[in-house]
Amino acid sequence: MNIPTNGAILKIEGLKTYFKTKTGYVKAVDGVSLYVPNQMVVGVAGESGSGKSTLINTIFRVLSKNAEIKGGEVLYQDRDILKMDEESFSKKIRWKEISWIPQVSMDVLDPVYKVKDQMVETILAHEDTSKAEALERVYSMIKSVNLRPEVLEKYPHELSGGQKQRVVIAMALLLDPKLVIADEPTTALDVIVQAQIIDIIRKLKKEKNFSMLFVSHDLALLAGLSDYLAIMYAGKIVEFGKVEEIYKAPSHPYTQLLLESIPDIRKRGSKLKSISGSPPDLLNPPSGCRFNPRCPFAMDVCKSVEPEIVNVSPTHYVACHLRK
Ligand SMILES: Nc1ncnc2c1ncn2[C@@H]1O[C@H](COP(=O)(O)OP(=O)(O)OP(=O)(O)O)[C@@H](O)[C@H]1O
């Protein structure tokens, strides 16, 4: 594999994050390599249970207690952030350099503080600045997520789902991070609010020029937002490339099926396909290519040998025996 990772703000190499359970290890992220080019948006698409949240939680170091990192590295600006002690990671990296927009269901806002107080506190905890200056930044940030300043006087439980998620986005961008990692930030919101939130993220990305890793099961949403796409299946990245490369020439059968399963507004009336079968149990994933039991093109080799990652172009790679 030959990936031009020069200028990548984030490089993930061979990452393995497993969960220890009574019946064995759940191999949620199993040898993932991925990079985020500077100031680009990389979308990670995959079905529920493919390991997307585990990948994000490993980067932000918010894994549950039974998680074990079994291998690999996460290089942020060429520094392995998995090797940093918690205190320095929390002081130097978390929120300041790398920020996190979690799923709506994650309660990251503290219920006992007004929005204004928690935002001001976040700035004062990380930066040597006056309260007045911090407050000014909070007002400006709240405005840039299209919320009225009155929201600042409220407690999190007084906000609607959409308002809360805008506050979460404002919090995530408060310290001007260089990399934002987002985990299905609009899932569970209604479609109109979802579209508003995506517009806000797009606008802020343009203004602030951060890099972004954006995880979603919604390939159509990702296609409109990302520069690069990574397709994740059963704990592995099966294909990676520029959005246009993946759309024009999807090289993995799973990617092809995923693309056929989303509505195409240009081809009205075209029949949507669904992918038969269900994702494997990550306690005992299939040997060889993990997609082989569902793959319409599976050959004998697919059942026993894990496919290597090969380049389709300098910025496009795939793990499939058909592409050797
Ligand atoms: N704490 C845990 N203990 C054991 N297994 C876990 C734990 N957390 C997640 N898993 C398992 O790890 C696998 C990957 O889960 P993960 O949440 O990362 O997937 P996902 O792609 O983000 O799915 P979703 O879109 O549903 O959130 C799943 O099989 C899940 O059941």
Image: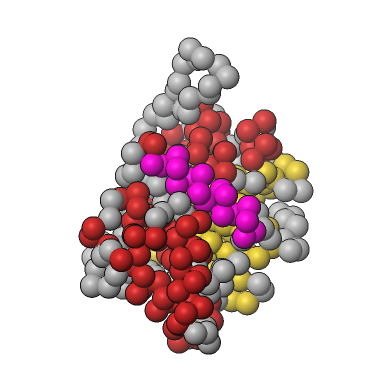
Q: Residue at x 57, y 44 (%)?
A: 225
> Of 320 and 252, which appears nearest the observer?
252
Name the quadrant of the C terminus.
top right
Q: Position of residue 296 (x, y in %)?
A: 50, 28
Please count the marks in the image. 0
Left or right, 23 with reference to 130: left
Q: Work out whether residue 182 can be spotted.
A: no
Residue at (50%, 56%) from the top-left corner? 144
Q: Is residue 200 magenta?
A: yes
Task: State left or right for residue 184 relative to residue 190.
Answer: right
In this view of the protein, which residue sits in the foreground, 149 or 301?
A: 149
Q: On screen, 249 above or below 8?
A: above
Q: Residue at x 39, y 60 (%)?
A: 149
In the picture, residue 195 is in which quadrant? top left
Residue 41 appearing in the image: yes
Q: Quadrant of residue 54?
A: bottom left
Quadrant where the N terminus sits is bottom right
Q: Residue furthest top?
A: 269
Residue at 34% in and 60% down: 150
Between 155 and 35, the one nearer to me in the picture: 155
Residue 45: percent from the left, percent from the top?
50, 45
Q: Which residues are magenta?
A: 193-209
Judge whether 133 appears above or below 272 on screen: below
* Residue 256 x %, y %: 56, 31
Magenta: predominant secondary structure element? helix
Whether residue 15 is in magenta: the answer is no
In the displayed structure image, the side of residue 245 where residue 82 appears, left or right: left
